[in-house]
Image (cartoon, rainbow, N blue to C red):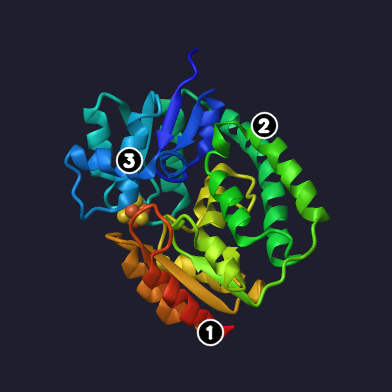
Amino acid sequence: MKTKRIGFTTSLPVEVIYAAGHIPIDLNNIFLSQDSSGHIHKAELKGFPRSLCSWIKGNFSSALCSDLDEVIGIVQGDCSNSSSLLEMIAEEGIGIHRFSFPPEREYAALDKEISRLEAHYDVSRKQTQEVKVWLDSIRVKLIELDRLSYVERKVCGRDNHLWLVNSSDFQGDPNRFERDLDEFLYQARASEPLPTRLRLGYLGVPPIFRDLYDSVSDLGGDVIFNEVQRQFSMPHLKQDIVEQYLVYTYPYSVLDRLKDIKHQVKLRNIEAIIGYTQAFCHLQIDNLLLKKHIKLPFLNLEGELPEKLDSRTILRLESFFEVHS
Ligand code: SF4
């Protein structure tokens, strides 16, 4: 059987793709690791509007240049633009499959959707569960990495972000990912704790800015909690695949996210929040509720293009640190 390269638009049960012997590829990670500005330009030449989220344009161009056999679009529980993005990808001759996180967040509905994905790749639930045990043995190490971030302070916010965000697809090779992770953990444990004046929580989709974490660290703070990235790493370790993707908060109501955030904010002694939103993203509305219900200093940052922080955003960060650290 040919090993296929399967792109996807946000975290989904990658266990199924690995169980089928294929390689899952998170298009968002490809977008940021390549010529991101070029990707946006190429999508705009195809007619994507300027007033559309850059991640969508980046995902489109990443799909075209990654030698993919198929793209799975998460058409419910992620982005309101995913359906249209998927149609544009299909138009370029790449196969597509739709996956949904049913908004009612019920076991039977999600079970049916995962079964549909398994049927598409000719995989049994038993095979999916076997891969889940394998991936969970790596996720345990990511939980340890996260603990080193907020308890021992031996992992900085940027590294925490990178490891957790890349666990959405294990970079297409879980064995290599685990070897690199083991090496990183070995060195982190041996390092000195990081000095931190202000313990920050980062809420929202991963930043498109290239240097946000470094700039925060230059100002004397650090991100101790990466909300959505932590969700991508599936830290709950539920035995059952359906349960795992039910406790995963990102695809569901912002109020479900809020419960998780409040718990983690308390656990990690978070002192202030950066709420990141992407220009032209519907999640900006959810951010209003997060800001309203989290009783901590809250700085809202908006990014649009994959570049370094602009001077206005740097000034806002500096003022925030002057007042709160
Ligand atoms: S940032 Fe918002 S608009 Fe952009 S891809 Fe993600 S969910 Fe969609």
Instruction: Identify the mark nearer the N-term, 2 or 1.
Output: 2
> Residue 22 at x, y = what percent?
51, 24
Residue receiving disc 3: 38
Q: Sequence order check: which comes first, mark 3 or mark 1?
A: 3
Could you tell me residue 179's position as x and y percent? Answer: 72, 36
> Where does the C terminus fall, quadrant-wise?
bottom right
Label 3 packing within 10 angstroms: few (<14), some (14-19), many (20+): few
The answer to whether 92 is drawn above or below residue 56 in the figure is: above
State the residue at coordinates (27%, 49%). Answer: 81
Residue 294 visible, this angle: no
Which kind of residue does numbered mark 1 sit on? Glu
Q: Residue at x 55, y 36 (%)?
A: 171
Q: Which residue is mark 1?
A: 322
**Residue, far front:** 311
Mark 3, secondary structure of its residue: helix
Quickly name the residue at label 2: 175
Q: Nearer the viewer, residue 274 or 5?
A: 274
Relative to residue 55, is residue 321 depicted above or below? below
Instruction: State the image quarter where residue 208 is shown.
Output: bottom left
Give the distance between the C-alpha atoms of the residues marked 3 and 2, in whole angstroms. Answer: 31 Å
